[in-house]
Amino acid sequence: MSPEEMEFQPFIAPLTELLDIYRHEQKARKNQEKKDKTADSEEQDKSWEEERDMHIGWALF
């Protein structure tokens, strides 16, 4: 192992750990965004259904 490699050796483990944490947080963030998007889409679908039902109700009179 060269002297340059030995100088960086103490940093590798902490950097690897921080990289793993970063990856985990990014994955969690993406999953949360996906859940939020799905919830927003479901809420919008429900709103459209309610509006449609209201228009159908008026059409019956």
Image (spheres, rainbow, N blue to C red):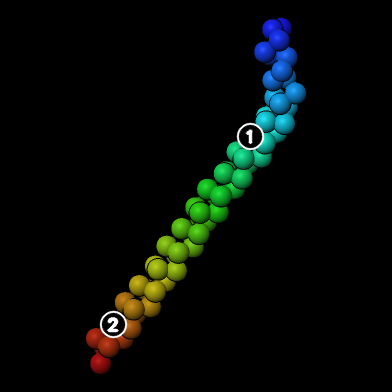
Residue type for callout 1: Leu
Q: Is residue 5 above or below residue 58?
A: above
- In the rendered image, residue 2, in percent from the top left (x then y), is placed at 69, 7
Classify residue 30 as left or right of residue 59: right
Q: Is residue 45 above or below residue 10?
A: below
Q: Residue at x 67, y 31 (%)?
A: 15
Image quarter of residue 57 = bottom left
- In the rendered image, residue 60, in percent from the top left (x then y), is placed at 26, 88
Q: Which residue lies under the disc numbered 1? A: 19
> In what element is the residue under mark 2?
helix
Label 1: few (<14), some or many (≥20) within 10 Å? Answer: few
* Mark carried by residue 53: none
Q: Which residue lies under the disc numbered 2? A: 55
Residue type for callout 2: His
Mark count: 2
Sequence order check, earlier mark of 1 and 2: 1
